[in-house]
Amino acid sequence: MRTSRLSQNVGSVRWLALILLGVIAAAGGLAAALLEMMPADRPGFGWIAALAGLAAGAGLITWGLVVFARAIREPVPMVNSKPVTEALRSVQRKHRGTRVVAIGGGTGLPAVLRALKPITGNLSAVVTVADDGGSSGRLRRELGVLPPGDLRNNIVALADDENIMARLFQYRFNGAELDGHAFGNLFIAALAGVTGSIEQALIETAHVLNIQGRVLPSTLDDVALAADIRVPGTGQPVHIEGESQITAAGGRIESIALVPPDVSAYGESVRAILEADIVVIGPGSLYTSILPNLLVENIREALRATSAYKIYLCNVATQPGETDDFTVAEHVMTLEHYIGRGVFQAVLANDHMPTRNAGEFTRYVQPVSAHHEIAQRYEVRYFDLTDDERPWRHSPEKLARAILSMRDMQGDDGTQPSNGLGS
């Protein structure tokens, strides 16, 4: 996927210089032509010079306009009431910021993107494409496209929150044949048909929504999830295929796998991880949003190979049918079971458990003591990460502060130099 270079394009005057050179060349060619039409005794090279000047001028002007068009097509944040110069400096600072990759899906990953997009423009989301329920599942079955729902949610998270197109993408139809479909899902599926690939559809959608950053699928293969689940009242675990059926089974997940197991990772996702300075894994449904990415072999190998500082961001609340009664330690040890130890260096978790707005069904993920074995293997940090209105979810603002704090502490201990997130 093409990387945005807005700060470089807008910060330069290449397009203007090319157009000016084109005008000069065209003017020279026109002057040569006028001189040739005047009666005079001169060599017969005037028309050649005139045609060469006009052709060079037209070429340079066209080239300059193309460079200009590319510059203004790249995503740029809305400047609102800020002076244009201040807005452009902000864009340039962001594109010099830390390269961050966030991995996950569902409703958790957008919170990370909303937290980080004001800080750095070098932000990539690697998103699961195993969803088979709701609008995404219907489009997947009927049109044969990758499920667009998680991709859409994360693209919208990177857009201007006040952008009417961002709100339109989240609109769901009610009634008739389109009942339950999100407009953004239909848009992405239609673009995939028009452009011939989901890759190009995501690029064009990013342009339409004017986003900061990139949203990348973990794989372009048609992949499903399968799980062995121990359902209360049954003897042997039940084998279930389909992401939407796993949590609906109402049991305890004993194992989970991709079908087929040997899918290929999307190359741009692997490249983003290898080039990252920070990788944030989660939050999101442990088995159905996070692990589907990490079970893609090349994604897992890229995480092992990258020199990035890697943080596992634990959920605030447990999820019925997936992580009932899980503590922070059980989340971490489940990841270790599938990807091995030492893939990430730090664990970021919540230690604030408000009752206001929590409702009767919220069960917070409980912290573990500093003497627990995971605290011996990882740098475990606790913060208040809860959203005031929906405390079972992360607050983007609190997340931003916590991630910056971990970045600063990580840089201070000499493990990896702090390169200025958002500087």
Image (cartoon, rainbow, N blue to C red):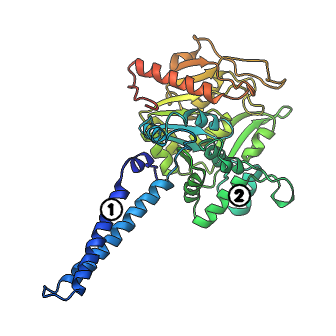
The label shown at residue 268 is: none
Residue ID at (44%, 34%): 277
Query: Which residue is denoted by mark 1 in the rendering?
Result: 20
Closer to viewer: mark 2 or mark 1: 1
Which element type, helix, strand or loop, lies under badge 2?
A: helix
Q: Is residue 333 visible?
A: no
Q: Which residue is mark 2?
A: 186
Q: Residues within 10 Å of mark 2 (few under 14, many from 20)?
A: some
**Which quadrant of the structure image shows residue 176?**
bottom right
Occupied quadrant, residue 44: bottom left
Contact flag, marks 2 and 1 (Cβ < 8 Å): no
Q: Is residue 170 visible?
A: yes
Work out whether residue 132 or residue 333 is closer to the camera in this orientation and state it. Answer: 132
Q: Is residue 5 above or below residue 233?
A: below
| Nearer-N-terminus badge (2/1) | 1
Residue type marked 1: Leu
